[in-house]
Image (spheres, helix red, strand yellow):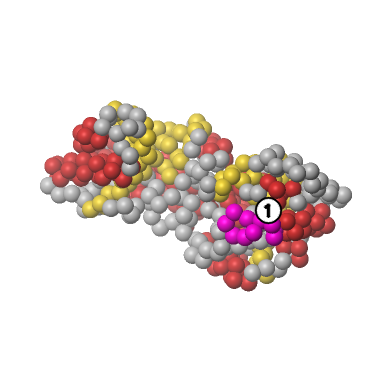
Amino acid sequence: MQTPAEQRTAEQRTILVTCPKALPPFLRAELEALGLPARELAAGVETLGDMHTAMRLNLALRTGHRVLSELARFRADDPTALGRELFRLPWEEIIPVDGHLTVDSSVQNDFVNDSRFANQKAKDAIVDRIQEQEGRRPNSGPDPIGACVFLHWRGSDVTVYLDTTGAPLTRRGYRKMPHLAPLQESLAAGIILATRFDAATEHFLSPMCGSGTLAIEAALLGLGRAPGLLRPDFAFRHLIGFDEAAYEALRRELHAQAKKTLPRRILASDNDPEAVEAARQNARTAGVEDHIEFSVADFRETLVPEGPGVCVLNPEYGERMGDAGQLAETYAAIGDFFKKRLSGWRGYVFTGNAELAKRVGLKPKRRTPFYNAKIECRLLEFELYQGSRRQPKDNGGSGAALL
C-alpha cells in the first residue's frame, strides 16, 4: 500500500513553470517537445504532471526558472485566514521535521503591504502544524536549502505550490567566473533558441563572448545535454516521499541521450583576455570546454569558418556599462563585420538601445523581444549576403520601430 506521501508524489497536478518576461513562447516549445500539454501565461507556462514530471522538468528545461507543483487553493481575506487555511494542510506528510523550510510569495491585495509578512505568516502556520503532529518543527529561513513553498495571493484567492526547484534554474552552477554584466543562462538559452541554431549543420560564433554564457549554452543545446544535470541540488530532494532511485535513473537516462561530439564548430572570442579566461573556466565547469574554441581577438578579427552558421553579438548598449554616445562606432563596425566576413550566415545583435541598433546599417529581417533584467531589448536578425549593407539615415527618428 502506498503511503500518503507516495500517493501525493504520483498524483497528477497542475505544474506552473515560471520564467522571465518574453521567454514563455520558448518555454512552451520546450514543454511540448517533452510531450507535455502547455498553456502559455504572461510569466510562465502551465502543464500537468506528477513529481516525476517535476523532476524531469527541473533537469531538462533551459528557459524555465522554477517548477511549481500546485498543492491547494483556497480563499483568504486577511493574514489570519491565510494562516488558518494553511494550518489545515497535512504538512507533516510533506516536509520532514529534521529538514529546512523556505516560504516565498507573490502578493497583490489590500491586506498585506509586504510579501515578507505573508511569508512569515505562512511559515508559522506550516511549522505549527508539523509541531502539533510530530512534536518537533523543522528549521526555517530565507535561503532555499531545503523544502520550499510558494504562495500566489491575488485579492482573496490563494494558490499554494510546492516549489520543487529552490534556487532558480537559471543558476546552472557553471558560472564561477562572471564577467561584466553577464547574461542570465536562461536568457542566453532563449536567445539561442530564437536564432533557430541547428548544431548539426551550422557553426556558432560568439564574438564579444564576455563570460561565455552564449557559447556555453549553445554547446549544451547542441550536445543535447540537460542543463539541470550540472546542479547539485533541487528542492524536491528535500520532500517526504522523494524517490532517490527514480531520480538517479532519470539522470542516467538524460546523460545517455546527450551527444559526445558536435559536427560543427562553436567559437568564442573577446578582446579582453580576462573575459576569455573567465569564459574558458566557466566552460570547463560546465563540461563543454573541449567543444568551444576560445581566442583573444577583436570581433572584427575573429576567426570565421566557412558557413553556414549563426553569429550572435551582445554589445554594450549604454544602460549599465558605458556611454551610448561612444558605442555608435562599434555598432557601425558590426554592420561592416557582418557584410565583409559573414556572407551566407545569419547574424544577430542583442541590444537594448534602438538608436545604436540603427548604426548597424542593415535592415533586420526579424525583431524578437526580450528583457535583460528590467531593460527591454530586441534580438535583431540579419540575413547576410554580399551587398546587404545600407547607409543609415539620420532623420531624427526615435527608433521606436526597433523597441
| Secondary structure, magenta segment, majority class | loop
Q: In the rendered view, does 314 fall on the left or right side of 345?
A: left
Specify the quadrant of the image occupied by residue 271.
bottom right
Q: Is residue 256 visible?
A: no
Q: In the rendered view, does 160 fall on the left or right side of 61?
A: left
The answer to whether 337 is drawn above or below residue 122 in the figure is below
Q: In the rendered view, does 264 fall on the left or right side of 140?
A: right
The answer to whether 356 is drawn above or below residue 106 in the figure is below
Q: Quadrant of the N terminus?
A: top left
The answer to whether 331 is drawn above or below residue 9 in the figure is below
The residue positioned 64% from the left and 45% from the top of the image is 378
Where disc 1 sits, the SS reads: strand
Magenta region: 318-327
Q: Quadrant of the C terminus?
A: top right
The residue positioned 31% from the left and 37% from the top of the image is 112
Residue behind mark 1:
312
How many residues crowd mark 1 within 10 Å: few (<14), some (14–19), many (20+)? Answer: many
Q: Is residue 353 visible?
A: yes
Please provide percent x and percent y for residue 251.
44, 52
**Amino acid found under the numbered disc labelled 1:** Val
Query: In the displayed image of the protein, which residue is found farthest to the front?
Result: 396
The answer to whether 143 is drawn above or below residue 63 in the figure is below
Q: In the rendered view, does 5 fall on the left or right side of 295?
A: left
The residue positioned 70% from the left and 51% from the top of the image is 356
Please provide percent x and percent y for residue 37.
49, 31
The residue positioned 44% from the left and 56% from the top of the image is 231
Specify the quadrant of the image occupied by residue 328.
bottom right
Q: Total label count?
A: 1
Please provide percent x and percent y for residue 161.
34, 38
Name the residue nearer the viewer: 362 or 161: 362
